[in-house]
Amino acid sequence: VGLPLIVSDRDFAHCICGDSALYVEPHNPTDVAEKFFSLARDPNIRRSLITSGRTQLSRLPTQAVRFREILQLLEVV
């Protein structure tokens, strides 16, 4: 939707988002607040994350492709 992401600093999120998100330790409110403030203060960070997000989305499979792959996996099991 063209918005910057702030996501949990977890392996799965790094695999999906790459460099298109700010990562936070979800159990550290200070870290979360600092990342929100950095987005609010710095338009360059917002622009960079949005641009990276669009690029990252173009690399990911569509919802239809993911759905088909999940169905194929279930058929094997």
Image: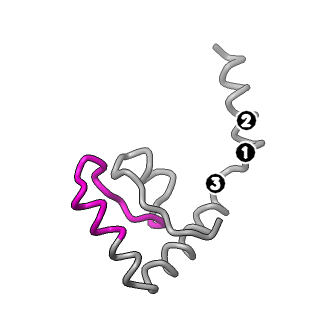
Name the residue: 67% across, 63% down: 58
Residue lying at 70% horizontally and 34% vertically, measured from the top left: 69
Q: Is residue 72 above or below residue 37?
A: above
In front here: 76 or 41?
A: 41
Q: Circle 2 is placed at which residue position? A: 67
| Mark 2 residue type | Phe
Q: Which residues are magenta?
A: 19-36
Which is in the foreground here, disc 3 or disc 1? 1
Left or right of 1? Residue 32 is left
Nearer-N-terminus badge (3/2): 3
Query: Which secondary structure, mark 1?
Result: helix
Residue type beneath disc 1 = Gln
Q: Mark 1 and mark 2 in contact (Cβ < 8 Å)? A: yes
Q: Position of residue 46 (x, y in %)?
A: 48, 78
Q: Residue at x 46, y 60 (%)?
A: 18
Of residue 12 and residue 34, the one placed in the foreground of this image is: 34
Q: Is residue 65 left or right of residue 24?
A: right
Tell me the distance, in whole angstroms, between the alpha carbons under discs 2 and 1: 6 Å
Q: Quadrant of residue 55?
A: bottom right
The verdict on residue 35 being magenta is: yes
Three-letter code for the amino acid on which mark 3 is drawn: Leu
Q: Classify mark 1: residues with Cα within 10 Å, few (<14), some (14-19) or many (20+).
A: few
- Determine which of the numbered discs, if any, sits on residue 50 in the image: none
